[in-house]
Image: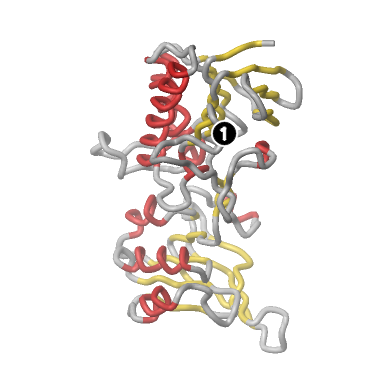
Amino acid sequence: METAKCLIIGSGPAGYTAAIYASRANLAPILYEGTQPGGQLTITTEIENFPGYPDGIDGFEMMDQLRRQAKRFGTDIRQGMITSIDLSKRPFIATIDDGAAIIAADSVIIATGASARYLGLDDETRFRGRGVSACATCDGFFYRGKTVAVVGGGDTACEEATYLSNLAAKVYMIVRKDHLRASKVMQERVFGTPNIEVLFNTNTVGLFGTDGVEGAHLVRHKGTPQEEPLDIAIDGFFLAIGHKPNTEFLNGQVELDNAGYIVTRDGSQATSVDGVFAAGDVADPVYRQAITAAGMGCKAALDVEKFLLANGH
């Protein structure tokens, strides 16, 4: 059985930054990249809000740079996925690709991220990165003066729509129900914003465009005698129907909040299991930004170093 001082599960800005710091601390980390090396940023066309890139940078290129930096300092970066892990005692036993390999780790950093929920339309995949986004604060800047749509009726959707209203000329909110689920304060903000139009009782059934999103196919009052098709012209389509933290492989062994995000404690990246740390979107239901994920990755690696020293490694 292979052993590791520090096992990092997941890539992206949290995993790669943790690897950089852990490598420089001489912890010889092993990092498994998972099914999407580089994480969600690899499908983002351009990142303009990460410090140090005044002209912006392609998401895939940025993750490749972080990856190469981690590798330069000695991180053992591997393809594959941790399909299960036993956190009941140390060393922790991780199984890769359903038994292809097994690693005994003295410490673990979980950086598996959170996946945005999509409607399940083929067009969402076709236009991802070309008009379809799940992060208004990441991509809203590209739609200054344009028309966009936000799908969802909760607080997140209202927050995204309000944020976009300061950039876009027009914001549609596409809401399946006949009301918003958001808090009263958020509803008042939406209804008080002149360039936000809420389309209640409306489902999205498709998107259209040539090189990018140019519009959406909608159905109003679906499944009722009042059902009618509606097409709207838009330049951007934002999903705001929630995120799903990628924690299934943990099988409930660490404390999660009500939404399934890993709970960290004492102002650190430590989880409810000693020696297990979490960083990035998997432990962040609030910000979900590349820069905050990278900061959490740094903290997690420093926490690991301190933990290993305190436990005789």
Give the quadrant of residue 216.
bottom right
Residue 42 percent across, percent down from the top left? 48, 37
**Is 95 displayed left or right of 118 in the figure?**
right
**Is 251 displayed left or right of 112 in the figure?**
right
Q: Is 125 in front, or is 274?
A: 274
Which residue is under mark 1?
273
**Is 201 displayed left or right of 130 in the figure?**
right
Q: Quadrant of the N terminus?
A: top right
Give the quadrant of residue 103.
top right
Colouring style: secondary structure
Residue 22 percent across, percent down from the top left? 42, 19
Residue 198 percent across, percent down from the top left? 47, 78
Counting the numbered discs, the total is: 1
Q: Is 289 in front, or is 279?
A: 279
* The furthest residue to the bottom: 225
Callout 1 amino acid:
Val
Which residue shows up at 72% across the image and 88% down it? 225
- Does the rendering let one see residue 37? no
Which residue shows up at 38% across the image and 31% down it? 299
Q: Is 282 in front, or is 215?
A: 282
Which residue shows up at 55% across the image and 26% down it? 108
* The furthest residue to the right: 99
Tell me if mark 1 has few (under 14), some (14-19) or many (20+) residues whose alpha carbon lies within 10 angstroms of its own: some
- Does the rendering let one see residue 108? yes
Residue 185 percent across, percent down from the top left? 39, 76
Q: Is 189 in front, or is 255?
A: 255
Which residue shows up at 42% across the image and 43% down it? 45
